[in-house]
Image: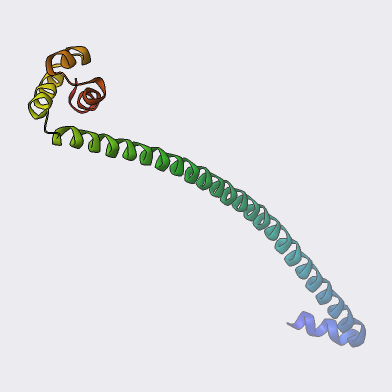
Amino acid sequence: MDFLRDYIEKDPAGNISTIIVVLTILLLIFVVSAFLFDYFKNDQNSKKTNMLERAIKDLIEEFRSLEINLSEQKKILNDYKYTLEKLDLEISRLADSNKGDSNITTAIQMANQGRSLEEISSATGLNEDEIEPILKYHGK
């Protein structure tokens, strides 16, 4: 502390202005270094933000393609459902007919045994349109 007092007492106006200039230079150095630090941090954060935005866009693209695939699968499943409902109605119609209840039972048994369409047709007298659904449901 004595050094500072002795320094100021020799030339008070000149020494105080020198101290102010030195403090101003130190303050400027501090401000510039803080600005540079902030600038580089912002640059790094900007790069990270851009990377995250690209990743989000990629995810959105993947979700859209997944949505398209799922809607296509839904259409296929609806087609299968429609086909199964038609086959179920056809089997019910065949089972409800009065003329061939025992023939249908025989055809189902033969289909379970792995017999061909021609064999079932010749044994039961049913036509091919009536035997095909039975083979689809009960055939091996």
21 and 57: which one is in front? 57
71 and 6: which one is in front? 71
**Above/below status of 46 relative to 79:** below
**Above/below status of 55 relative to 72:** below
Q: Quadrant of residue 39?
A: bottom right
Q: Quadrant of residue 2?
A: bottom right
65 and 80: which one is in front? 80
Quadrant where the C terminus sits is top left
State the scheme by which the image is colored.
rainbow
Q: Quadrant of residue 85?
A: top left
- Name the residue at the left extreme: 102
Quadrant where the N terminus sits is bottom right
In the image: residue 2, left or right of residue 88: right
**Above/below status of 25 relative to 119:** below
Spot occupied by residue 103 in the image (x, y as percentages of width and height) = 10, 24
Q: Residue at x 15, y 20 (%)?
A: 111
- Name the residue at the front extreme: 99
Spot occupied by residue 65 in the image (x, y as percentages of width and height) = 52, 42
Q: Residue at x 48, y 46 (%)?
A: 67
Q: Residue at x 23, y 37 (%)?
A: 88
Spot occupied by residue 50 in the image (x, y as percentages of width and height) = 65, 52
**Above/below status of 30 relative to 132:** below
Spot occupied by residue 66 in the image (x, y as percentages of width and height) = 48, 43
In the image: residue 83, left or right of residue 123: right
